[in-house]
Image (cartoon, helix red, strand yellow):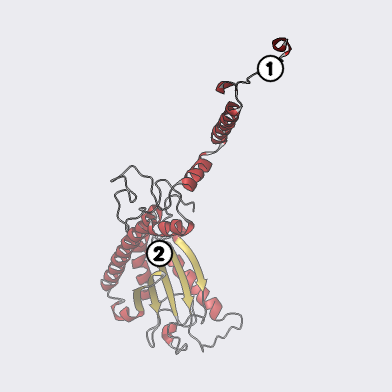
Amino acid sequence: MADTDASIIIKKVKKGGHGHHGGAWKIAYADFVTAMMAFFLLLWLISAASPEQKEGIADYFSPPNVTATTSGSGGVMGGRTPAEHGANAAEGATPAKGEESQASLQAPDTEAATGQDSQMDVKSAENRAFHSAAVSIKQAWAEMPDITTESDNLLIEETEDGLDIMIVNQDGRPMFAEGSKYPLEHTRAALAAMAPILERLPNQISISGHTAAGQLYGNPRYGTWELSSDRANTTRAILSEFGLSADRFHSVIGRSTEDPYFPNDPTLAANERVKITVLHTAPPVPLGMKP
């Protein structure tokens, strides 16, 4: 009976699950999915970025003071010396504002240089032509016995405006009759001799008449302005008569006593004159520029 009444105890041993049935893999999978999402998001951002933005991103992650280059030794300086221009700048990088300005100042302007060369060539050729014309005019006057005694009344000089030819009154040796717009005969001959020589030049001609101060005029309606203007216009007419084309005249004006040849003494007879100026030609327009 004792054996029959004994209680039976059953022990159930709970065994642990296998490793692949645990929750650790879920964490690893979540990390993987997150990384893939970040990777594809990065690819999308890169594909949507402009080349300038990509270059900026690359520069941000590049080590400082390192130059990306394929020339030279491939090192930090790219085979260049520190003093060489561009050694500290990336190839193709946009220069800083100050560097760009300095580079533009140092770089030669081809068009400007060409324009300056052309101006110098024209100026040199014009100076030679002026000198040749001056020599020819003086030689023509020297061959005229009627005006050899008046050589001091005929002046030729080069100025900033061009080639000045002046017919000047002297004390006791006038080139125009007193108070008259008409030149004396030897003055007319001198003008006739220079007209063909001036016609060979391509330059424009300006004529101005001048009178001396302190003179009295009998006609109150005819004074220094009228006389200086009439003498300039009469000179133009004589030059045209002996071969100088009418379209060659740039201006014909009377200056009265406003521009004395001797400013310290405006009453001198030599201030009474007619000035014929062969004007410098306009400089050529540089290439690439509109007039």
Residue at the image position 45 percent from the left and 53 percent from the top: 95
* Residue 283 appears anywhere in the view: no
Question: Which of disc 1 and disc 2 is earlier in sequence?
Answer: 1
Residue placed at 43% from the left, 88% from the top? 268
- The front one of 118 and 84 is 84
Element class at badge 2: loop
Give whichever of 31, 90 is nearer the camera: 31
Residue beneath the point at 48% across and 46% down = 61
Instruction: Tell me the residue that label 1 is attached to.
Output: 9
Under mark 1, the amino acid is Ile
* The disc label shown at residue 170, or none: none
Towards the viewer: 290 or 151: 290
Circle 1 crowding by C-alpha within 10 Å: few under 14, some 14–19, many from 20:
few
In-image side of 88 versus 60 (left or right): left
One can see residue 99 in this view: yes
Q: Position of residue 211 (x, y in %)?
A: 48, 81
| Residue holding disc 2 | 280
For the N terminus, the image quarter is: top right
Residue 160 horizontal/vertical position (percent): 40, 71
